[in-house]
């Protein structure tokens, strides 16, 4: 039995996987390494693969605690061999979570073009060609970053909750004006990029991932497939690939 872990900036998510299919089992989520370890206590796990974009000290804290439990830990990086080719100009500068998303997309839709929109702390875009090549993508501020920035960098604008978004424009209050432009702008950004990509890569699978995937999925006009645990899926399928190519 194996453990795959997505260690983000604000949360840790993991899932149990087992051979031969390496599909995700129960998903565990926690805010700290200690809480996460408590959730998986008692599980019989031989090894773990961690994709971490957190500060190195947080990664090493989690890795050390897993090692003390007798679990062999492997870190997923852009140097890790995966089922797809990485065409990023400088692979060492690519976020490991972005590559894991791309692997996850390929495993869901092999030999098809896929475009991942990961709606997390940042809005990450990943394009995977049908030949099994990760072509790159884009990065822009995520929803919470945009809302928090308006509050932090002004004297009077409030810190808002996205759940209050009505979809109406123009906004007739400060709250509605902020939400309608911020969220409406993000939706327009996503749809414009999808339209641009579809001109060259057709048919195109649209995959929404990350914590805000379900939120944006309600408002996008493009048909999409929501998969909030895409990074974990990419890690699991990388493990499967390693076992199959031994």
Image: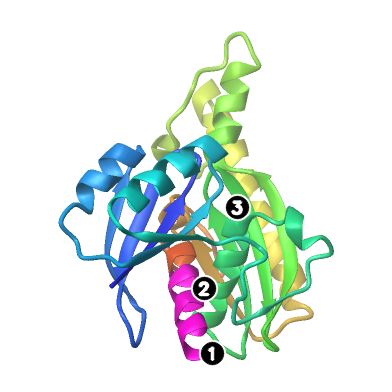
Judged from this view, the residue extending furthest toward the left is 42
The answer to whether residue 62 shows anywhere in this view is yes
- Residue 169 appears in view: no
On the image, the x and y values in percent for residue 180 come to: 56, 38
Task: Answer left or right for 14 relative to 202.
Answer: left
Say left or right for 44 vs 126.
left
- Magenta span of residues: 233-245
Question: Which of the 4 image quadrants contains residue 136?
Answer: bottom right
x, y percentage for residue 128?
67, 76
Total label count?
Answer: 3
> In this picture, is 100 found above or below 166?
below
Which residue is found at the position 51% from the left and 30% from the top? 176
Element under label 3? helix
User: Which residue: 29% across, 45% down?
Assistant: 36
Q: Where is mark 1, residue-wise?
A: 245
Estimate the x, y position of residue 72 in percent, counting from the top left.
39, 62
Q: Earlier in the sequence, mark 3 or mark 2?
A: 2
Which sits in the foreground, 88 or 137? 88
Q: Main secondary structure of the magenta part?
A: helix
Q: Residue at label 2?
A: 104
Q: Secondary structure at mark 2?
A: helix
Residue bearing the label numbered 3: 187
Real-space Cα distance between discs 1 and 3? 41 Å
Q: Marks 1 and 2, Cα distance to the nearest angstrom?
A: 18 Å
Sequence-first disc among 1 and 3: 3
């Amino acid at each position: 039995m194996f453990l795959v872990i997505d260690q983000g900036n604000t949360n840790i998510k993991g899932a149990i996987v087992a051979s031969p299919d390496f599909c995700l089992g129960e998903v565990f989520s926690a805010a700290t390494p200690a809480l996460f370890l408590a959730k998986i206590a008692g599980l019989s796990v031989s090894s773990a693969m961690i994709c971490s974009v957190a500060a190195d000290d947080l990664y090493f804290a989690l890795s050390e605690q897993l090692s003390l439990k007798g679990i062999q830990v492997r870190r997923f990086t852009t140097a890790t061999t995966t089922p797809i080719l990485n065409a990023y100009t400088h692979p060492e500068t690519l976020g490991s979570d972005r590559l894991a998303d791309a692997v996850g997309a390929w495993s869901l839709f092999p030999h098809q073009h896929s475009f991942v929109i990961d709606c997390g702390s940042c809005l990450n875009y990943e394009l995977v060609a049908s030949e099994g090549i990760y072509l790159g993508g884009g990065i822009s501020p995520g929803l919470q970053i945009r809302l928090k920035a308006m509050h932090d960098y002004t004297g009077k604008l409030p810190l808002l909750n996205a759940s209050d978004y009505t979809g109406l424009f123009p906004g007739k209050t400060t709250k509605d004006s902020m939400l309608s432009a911020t969220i409406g702008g993000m939706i327009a950004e996503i749809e414009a990029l999808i339209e641009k990509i579809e001109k060259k890569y057709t048919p195109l699978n649209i995959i929404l991932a990350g914590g805000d995937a379900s939120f944006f999925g309600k408002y996008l006009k493009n048909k999409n497939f929501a998969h909030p645990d895409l990074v974990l899926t990419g890690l699991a399928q990388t493990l499967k690939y390693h076992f199959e190519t031994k």
